[in-house]
Image (tube, rainbow, N blue to C red):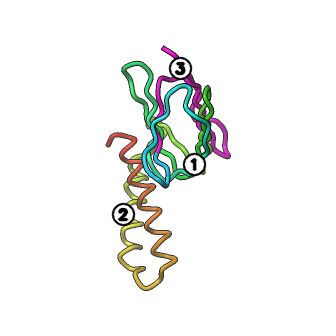
């Protein structure tokens, strides 16, 4: 079975690199499944989990926005931030979730603070989900 090379890269360096069977990402337009020999495209990503399928195992990477570039033989995910489940501090993510929720509750009058708090909440929830806790 053919495979496709996947790289998840942040400003701090590579988070993931390997040959896989399939990659799923969440773009601003919706969920996208990528198999080997996929047509080339570039799409913006939202906060979400990148699911990487290798054989019968599925690995997840928490991604906080960025872009995906797809070529027939390679997928490059350029993320603002990305973490493997083993690198996620769940307690810290839960604290961030609580802080963001409090800011959302108190920032209803200020649109900018509300959007920032909402994005922080999405990132925290995504990290907790990817960590499986």
- Residue lying farthest to the front in this orientation: 39
Residue located 53% across and 25% down the image:
36
- Along the viewing direction, whichever of 7 and 42 lies nearer the viewer: 42
Tell me the SS state at disc 3: loop
> Residue 3 got which mark?
3
Q: Disc 3 versus disc 1: distance between alpha carbons?
A: 21 Å
Q: Identify the magenta region.
A: 1-25
Q: Quadrant of the C terminus?
A: top left
Q: What secondary structure is marked by label 1?
A: strand
Is 3 magenta? The answer is yes
Secondary structure mostly seen in the magenta stretch: strand
Mark earlier in primary sequence (1, 2):
1
Depth check: 31 or 38 in front?
38
Distance between mark 3 and mark 2 Cα atoms: 40 Å
Residue 94 occupies quadrant: bottom left
Q: Quadrant of residue 24?
A: top left
Answer above or below: position of 125 versus 87.
below
In the image, which disc is placed on residue 43? 1
Label 2 sits on residue? 98
Q: Give the answer, above or below, for where 97 lies relative to 37.
A: below
Answer with left or right where residue 22 lies relative to residue 9: left
């Amino acid at each position: 079975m053919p495979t496709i090379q996947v790289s998840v890269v942040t400003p701090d360096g590579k988070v993931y690199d390997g040959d896989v069977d399939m990659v799923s990402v969440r773009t601003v337009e919706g969920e996208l499944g990528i198999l080997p020999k996929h047509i080339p495209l570039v799409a913006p990503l939202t906060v979400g989990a990148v699911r990487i399928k290798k054989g019968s195992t599925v690995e997840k990477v928490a991604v906080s926005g960025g872009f995906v570039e797809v070529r027939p033989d390679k997928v490059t995910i350029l993320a603002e931030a990305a973490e493997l489940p083993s690198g996620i501090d769940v307690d810290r993510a839960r604290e961030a979730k609580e802080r963001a929720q409090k800011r959302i509750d108190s920032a209803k009058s200020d649109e900018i603070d509300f959007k920032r708090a909402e994005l922080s909440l999405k990132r925290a929830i995504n990290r907790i989900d990817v960590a499986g806790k």
